[in-house]
Amino acid sequence: MGCVARNTKLKIGAWSAGLIGGLALAGALAAQPPGRTITVHINGADYGKLPTGLKVGDTIHWVNDDTVGHTVTARDHSFDLHLNPGQSANLTLQKDGTYQIYCLYHSTMRGVLTAAAR
Ligand SMILES: [Cu+2]
């Protein structure tokens, strides 16, 4: 009888340790940095050299250095940033895949962003 009671206690102990371990793991994951931030300057109606090696959770900080407005628009409609002259905006890639981007106002402004799964 005493033996059974001891076993039960042991099981509860192991379960608690598992729960605490799980919480610690969740905490470690939450503390993980969400991703890198890469700045891209739009200049002369040109996105310039777009970043490569992107991963889901990475953020592109777009800065419009021009005196005219531009957009960073995804062909699949997953994002559509409008930047007035001198404005900046952040785009965090939420899903892995390849994004064809273009500017609504300038047909020469096109590019591709590829985000790998994290
Ligand atoms: Cu433009």
Image (cartoon, rainbow, N blue to C red):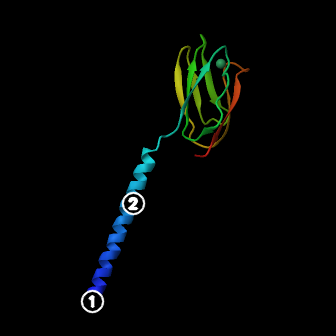
| Callout 1–callout 2 Cβ contact below 8 Å | no
Indicate which disc, 1 or 2, sits on the residue closer to the N terminus: 1
Q: Amino acid at mark 2?
A: Gly
Q: Which residue is mark 2?
A: 21
Asked whether, in this view, residue 93 is left or right of residue 29, the answer is right
Residue 26 drawn above or below residue 71: below
Residue 90 horizontal/vertical position (percent)? 52, 28
| Among the 4 quarters of the image, the one containing residue 111 | top right
- Dot 2 alpha-carbon crowd within 10 angstroms: few under 14, some 14 to 19, many 20 or more: few
| Among the 4 quarters of the image, the one containing residue 48 | top right
Locate ligand 1 by image quadrant.
top right
Mark 1 element type: loop
- Residue at screen point 56% across, 20% down: 63
Q: Nearer the viewer, residue 112 or 21?
A: 21
Residue 41 horizontal/vertical position (percent)? 60, 20
Residue 32 horizontal/vertical position (percent)? 46, 44
Residue 85 horizontal/vertical position (percent)? 56, 14
Q: Which residue is mark 1?
A: 1
Residue 33 drawn above or below residue 2: above
Q: Nearer the viewer, residue 3 or 64?
A: 3
Q: Which residue is farthest top?
A: 67
Q: Amino acid at mark 1?
A: Met
- Residue at screen point 30% across, 85% down: 4
Q: Which residue is farthest bottom?
A: 1
Report the Cα–Cα distance between label 1 and label 2.
31 Å
Mark 2 element type: helix
Asked whether, in this view, residue 30 is left or right of residue 52, the answer is left
- Residue at screen point 53% across, 21% down: 88
Residue 88 drawn above or below residue 32: above
Asked whether, in this view, residue 75 is left or right of residue 81, the answer is right
| Among the 4 quarters of the image, the one containing residue 60 | top right
- Residue at screen point 55% across, 16% down: 84
